[in-house]
Amino acid sequence: MCKKDGFLRVARIGQHFYEEPPVSGTLGSGTVFFCGCNMRCSFCQNKEISADYRGTAFTQDELISEIKRLESEGVHNINFVTPSHLIGELRALLLLYRPKTTVYNTSAYDGAEGLKGLDGLIDIYLPDYKYSDASLSLKLSQKRDYPSVALNAIAEMFKQQPKNVYSDTGLLKKGVIIRHLILPGYLENSVNALKILSDNFTGCEVSLLSQFTPRADCPELPRTLKPIEYKTVYLTAMKLNFSKIYTQELSSASPEFIPVWDL
Ligand code: SF4
């Protein structure tokens, strides 16, 4: 399903300014967007690379050179995006070259055993928690077991990084921020997802994403989020046990924020 072909195939390497402010900072996050994915979200903004596996094949040494080049440009961290299906290859790369600050940016459809292999190699985990509703997960992402798999994966991430550590300038240096993309018309899924996170990871930091952008090939989700929907989920989050809630402006729901796949 993930379409991996034995290479580290990448669609974009470069500075990225659209992560949470403590991750992007002022100089950007140094992102490595891997091709392929072990999920199949019908609404995926990156479908051209997640489902089609379009991109450039790098050897381990070539990718390490690119990472060093990014670091020399002054980015705040090296951010591996959609790495789950390449977790073994990523571990091997990080054992050869460990950037100063690393980010594992994932759907959270990860095996806890695989994540254990990254202990000591990843500083910041940015997992999604997309679904509390298994039938919705099956319908939109072809994975019925996503809610339980993602919860186990996030628990392992907290074992490795139990406390968020910020620099004097507000950059995240270590820790976990859990993202939740609010899907238009599916507020119950969002409210329950936040309750589960609050119960299981009391005091954690969450990021509420409003950036859902409709695609012509995803008729199940034909519109952007309404302000009242975002507000409802935000007010729910405010009543739960989170130590920090990152919010996102509704104007983020635009194709202009989708990176250009130039590799
Ligand atoms: S997990 Fe993310 S990259 Fe993968 S298909 Fe879903 S939205 Fe796309």
Image (spheres, rainbow, N blue to C red):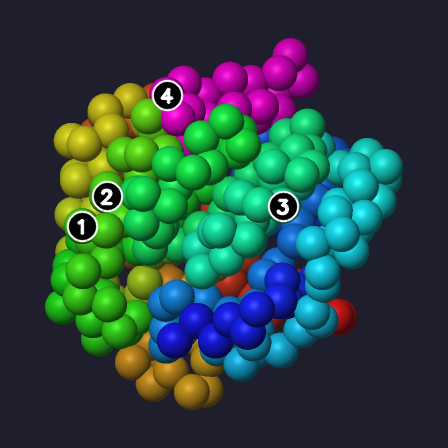
Label 1 beta carbon within 8 A of ligand 1: no
Q: Earlier in the sequence, mark 2 or mark 4?
A: 2
Is residue 136 or residue 92 the one in the foreground? 92
Q: Earlier in the sequence, mark 2 or mark 3?
A: 3
Circle 4 or circle 3, nearest the eye: 3
Q: Which residue is mark 1?
A: 148
State yes or no: residue 172 in magenta.
Answer: yes
What amino acid type is highlighted by mark number 3? Leu
**Residue at the (58%, 23%) spot, across then down:** 173
Circle 2 or circle 3, nearest the eye: 3
- Compared with residue 50, is residue 117 higher up or lower down, i.e. above or below? above
Q: Earlier in the sequence, mark 3 or mark 1?
A: 3
Q: Which residue is mark 2?
A: 151
Where disc 1 sits, the SS reads helix
Where disc 2 sits, the SS reads helix
Disc 2 to disc 1: CB gap under 8 Å: yes
